[in-house]
Amino acid sequence: MKIHTQAVHAGDRRKPTGAVPVTTPIYAASSFFYDTTDELDRVIGMEQAGYSYARYDNPTAAALEELVTALEGGHGALACASGMTAVQMAVETALTDRRASIVAADALYGASTKLLLNVLEPRGVEVRFVDICNLDALSAAVSHAKPGCILMETISNPLLRVGEIDKIAEIARAAGAALVVDNTFATPLIVRPLDLGASFSVHSLTKYLAGHGDVLGGAVVTDAAHFDALRTLARIVGPVLGPFESYLSMRGIKTFPLRMERQCANACRVASWLGSHPRVERVHFPADPAHPDAPAIRRLFAAGLYGAMVSFEIRDAGRPEIFRFLDRLQLVVRATSLGDVHSMILYPAMSSHRDLAPKHRERVGIRDNLVRLSVGIEAVEDIIADIEQAFA
Ligand SMILES: *Cc1c(COP(=O)(O)O)cnc(C)c1O
């Protein structure tokens, strides 16, 4: 054989030796080879399980999907290129064979609100927003809109409100709608939406699950009733997570419960310290007994875990004072994203909610003195010391 041919073929398509790698390798192949055409035919026709083409599935992504399915207690999952792709895939699947109408929580991740208003509504999907923590308001909106899908987040951004997923799932079921829960902030360590009756649990893997600030990804975990529709749509569109990102996500998830426990414990300490600091006007944190959703939190959250996001309002601060405070931080990283091993801080009026007029922001409770802290795994004394010196 000529070198040009060897360069293309030598070393590839080797049979497994019998030894199994202890962790899942990165399978970068875009297509898969079988001994006989007959076998490939059965795989493509989905009469036989197997891989054929990377838009349909990939062994590295499949391992990650099995992992997140187990964590969320679902029937199956789809690993997606981003959290937003996961939200979109879940909503599109929820609306398959249902009325093109969505009732959504009025507090959602900014891009999710934009997906509803700028992408789905112009295509003829009815969109209605409601305070998901007010079940009477939700029931009224649902009987009016007759939605095919209800969309909410377990812990809302940035005010950390918590809806009663089990009761909302009942309302959804009675109306024939599918409940999609973005579980990014809570993670399956704290709440498993499918156990509470939701049809879809969605993640930005970018945040707590992968957790190291080095990968963008998403996941949709769903029940048996919706899994085939999800995979069918995915086979056509190909919103898949690449094998390298799948590998990084899976590697990150191995330590996710340990990281999350530490982050939650650190967040409790930081929140109570902030609560007694003279420079702090108000702290928003789910462990607070005076939290507006305290009964739901007690009922639905895993004991002693309240998430690792802490939002707080700095007394008499406006944009210039907030910027000065943020610029003084030495350890806590000023950046978008959350859930990483390092603590991060963000100013919602500048980022997730910058497109809202100040008056509208104020009306939804996001004041110009509010910052959102994602507490990391550092020694909590160092996090507190950094915030303290930035207040000074
Ligand atoms: C970050 C985030 C998303 C979007 O995820 P990407 O990975 O950035 O696409 C969706 N929902 C929530 C709650 C998020 O925090």
Image: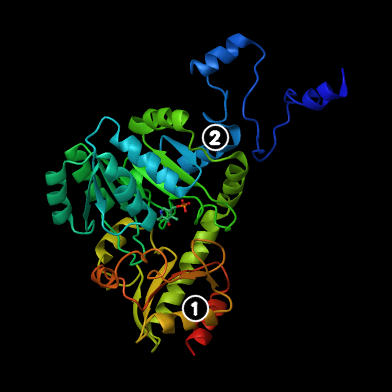
Residue 97 drawn at (x, y percent)? 26, 29
Question: At 30% from the left edge and 32% from the top edge, which residue is drawn?
Answer: 96
Mark identifier at residue 149: none
Three-letter code, disc 2: Ala
In the displayed structure image, the side of residue 145 where residue 272 appears, left or right: right
Q: Secondary structure at mark 1?
A: helix
Which quadrant, please, contains the N terminus?
top right
Q: Residues within 10 Å of mark 2 (few under 14, many from 20)?
A: some
Which residue matches tag 1?
326
- Which one is in front in this view, the residue at disc 2 or the one at disc 1? 1
In the displayed structure image, the side of residue 184 where residue 65 appears, left or right: right
Residue 52, placed above or below residue 182:
above
Residue 72, placed above or below residue 266:
above
Out of 81 and 118, give the one closest to the viewer: 118
Q: In which quadrant of the rendered view does residue 223 lie?
A: top left
Residue 83, placed above or below residue 271:
above
Out of 259 and 386, give the one closest to the viewer: 386
Asked if residue 356 shows in the view, the reply is: yes
Residue 178 drawn at (x, y percent)? 27, 39
Q: CA distance from mark 2 to mark 1?
A: 41 Å
Three-letter code, disc 1: Leu
Q: In which quadrant of the rendered view does residue 279 lie?
A: bottom left
Which residue matches tag 2?
62
Question: At 70% from the left edge and 36% from the top edge, which residue is drawn?
Answer: 21
Whichever of labels 2 and 1 marks the residue nearer the N terminus, that label is 2
Question: At 39% from the left edge and 33% from the top edge, which residue is drawn?
Answer: 230
Residue 175 drawn at (x, y percent)? 17, 39
The reply to whether callout 2 and callout 1 are in contact (CB within 8 Å) is no
Q: Residues within 10 Å of mark 1 (few under 14, many from 20)?
A: many
Residue at the extreme right of the image, as rendered: 2
